[in-house]
Amino acid sequence: MKEKLDFYSKTSIKSYNLNESMRYQLGMLDSLDAFTRVHSENVANITCRLCEYMKLNSAFTVYCTMCAYLHDIGKMFIPPKILQKNSSLTEEEFKIMKEHTTLGYKMCMEDPKLRPYAAGTIYHHESLNGSGYPKGLTKKDIPLEGQIIRVADEFDAIVSKRQYKTHIGISETLKLLVNDAELGKLNKKVLNCLFKVIIDDTNYEISMIFDYTKYLSSQIKRLEKIDEFNKKIQKAKSENKKEYIRANMKYLFENGENIENYKNVMEEYKTAYAKRKEKINELFNEIKSIKKLRV
């Protein structure tokens, strides 16, 4: 048994009924490279949850989430050498990269089934203070769906770059978003809802690890019982007594364990237990850090 964390496991568009048209839009993601596809799915999941935390109605939530799924569809037209470049883009390369917004918008507008969700492509890099692209719009001209997707997109981009395997340290990422909000780039209400989403996810991770520690604890107790039997064997004076203890002892062994290796296995379980308990404490501290963030 091993705990498994899905960073975006709590809610997704899959919780809603998808009609044939929506399935068509989601199928368009097959045109994207693997990294961009996963990013698009992550952004959609976060967007869906942000809408729910903002108490927006279900129809808008589905619409906004569909926009988020398609927000980077224009990247299918960006040259792979630019899209997959590991180092910083040159000024000219970044200029080409930014075209994914208008290219995606054009693609959606030309397809009747994608047209209703074109907003995600054109607005997700706009900033409330007018410093974004492609049009440099300000708050009054950026629809709510664009403002929500912008927060989800920026968050997942940083998380993916830093390759988080857990929520430990994620408050540092949120601080970067707080800075952008203070500069007037991001919607503060949306960002505050993101804090709640991350706290909820962190509590979810804690519960998963806690469940695993219960499993580890049960395994340690089982192995300690074996150790007790082994000590009794050492003290037993008659061979019959020893055989009786061994007979009871063998039923406690699992998965290739035996008298020669059980102590090593027990130590491995104890080490794993200590690490999980330490991680739980770190995650609780992470929640405290997130709760202190203000925008």
Image (spheres, rainbow, N blue to C red):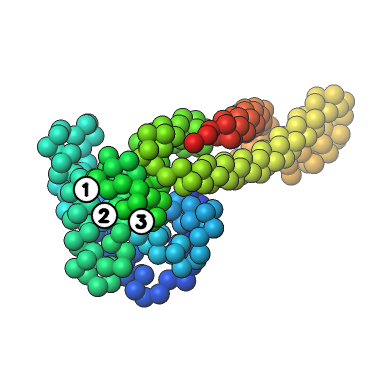
Q: Which residue lies furthest to the left in this view?
A: 92
Q: Residue at 58% x, 35% y: name it.
A: 291
* In-front residue for pair 253/143: 143
Amino acid carrying mark 1 in the image: Pro
Q: Residue at 22% x, 31% y: name it.
A: 87
The answer to whether the residues at label 1 and label 3 have Cβ atoms under 8 Å apart is: no
- What is the crowding at mark 3: few (fewer than 14 residues within 10 Å), some, or many (at least 20)? some
* In-front residue for pair 175/26: 175
- Residue 143 disc label: 3
Q: Residue at 28% x, 42% y: name it.
A: 130
The answer to whether the residues at label 2 and label 3 have Cβ atoms under 8 Å apart is: no
Q: Sequence order check: which comes first, mark 1 or mark 3? A: 1
Q: Sequence order check: which comes first, mark 2 or mark 1? A: 2
Residue carrying label 2: 122
Tell me: residue 13, above or below residue 234.
below
Q: In which quarter of the image is residue 23?
A: bottom left
| Residue 260 point in image, percent of width and height | 65, 29
| Residue 81 point in image, percent of width and height | 15, 41
Amino acid carrying mark 2 in the image: Ile
**102 left or right, relative to 43:** left
Q: In which quarter of the image is residue 215?
A: top right
Q: Residue furthest front?
A: 140
Under circle 1, the secondary element is: loop
Q: Residue at 82% x, 36% y: name it.
A: 245
Amino acid carrying mark 3 in the image: Pro
* In-front residue for pair 104/208: 104
**Can the viewer see residue 261?**
no
**280 left or right, relative to 76:** right
